Image: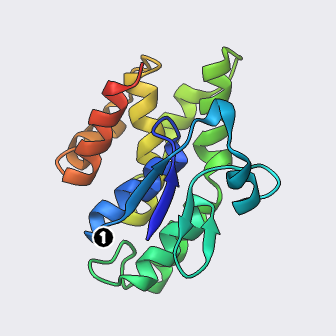
Amino acid sequence: MKVVDALRCPYCARVRIALAEKGVAYENVQVDLRDRPAWLIELNPPSGRVPVLREAIDLPDSEVIMAYLDERFPEPPLLPDDLEVRARARLLVHRFDANLGDDYYAFRRGDDNDLAGKLERLEVGVSLFSDIAYVPWVIRARDMLGVELPERVAGWLAALEQRPSVAAEVAVVQGLS
């Protein structure tokens, strides 16, 4: 199993964290997002976005990859057994851009936005699946953008940072320049 990855990319971070939670070994293929290789565009046309999981088939999109990994490697599960909670977690990930992503990227560009409000209202702790989907952006907002996290979100993040998979991502972010 190979993962086409870029350390700066929070979508890739989702996949790294999910793989770590599952204890799955993989080959990490790093790419430079400023100079995407032609082969990456062939793997994930037309954008050449990362991550891409290369196994029996080439799977792009972190949300799809996380769901695939949870089914391919059922233990330990990222989604709970309860059907309604599973659906809620999937919906949160599906609505990521509206719930956090759009405002995170606007803040990064220096645009006026509601990142503080989105963080205040962020629904966390529903499942490990949805937490993994959100935590890369929250780490980057705090550590790279200097955003002060609401107390509830800071507590959630502090608890997640006790997990080796999330602690490893914090170390990755701290190593980025």
Q: Residue at x 37, y 85 (%)?
A: 81
In the image, what residue type sits under mark 1? Val
Q: Position of residue 42 (x, y in %)?
A: 75, 59
- Residue 152, position as x, y percentages in the image: 33, 38
Circle 1 Cα neighbour tier, 10 Å, few/some/many (<14 / 14–19 / ≥20) = few
- Residue 125 can be seen in this image: no
Q: Is residue 151 left or right of residue 107?
A: left
Q: Position of residue 144 (x, y in %)?
A: 43, 21
Is residue 120 or residue 39 the one in the foreground?
Answer: 39
Asked if residue 65 is positioned above or below residue 99 in the image, the reply reads below
Check the picture and name the quadrant holding the N terminus.
bottom left
Query: Residue 155: x, y in percent?
Result: 26, 39
Q: Give the answer, above or below, for where 64 lies relative to 103.
A: below
- How was this image coloured? rainbow
The number of numbered discs placed on residues in the rendered structure image is 1
Q: Is residue 43 visible?
A: yes
| Vertical placement of residue 62 versus 81, above or below | above
Q: Which residue sits furthest right?
A: 46
- Which residue is identified by label 1? 24
| x 54%, y 76%: residue | 87
Q: Quadrant of residue 100?
A: top right
The answer to whether residue 77 is left or right of residue 6 is: left
Q: Secondary structure at mark 1?
A: loop
Quadrant (top left, top right, bottom left, bottom right) of the C terminus: top left
Q: Is residue 18 left or right of residue 102?
A: left
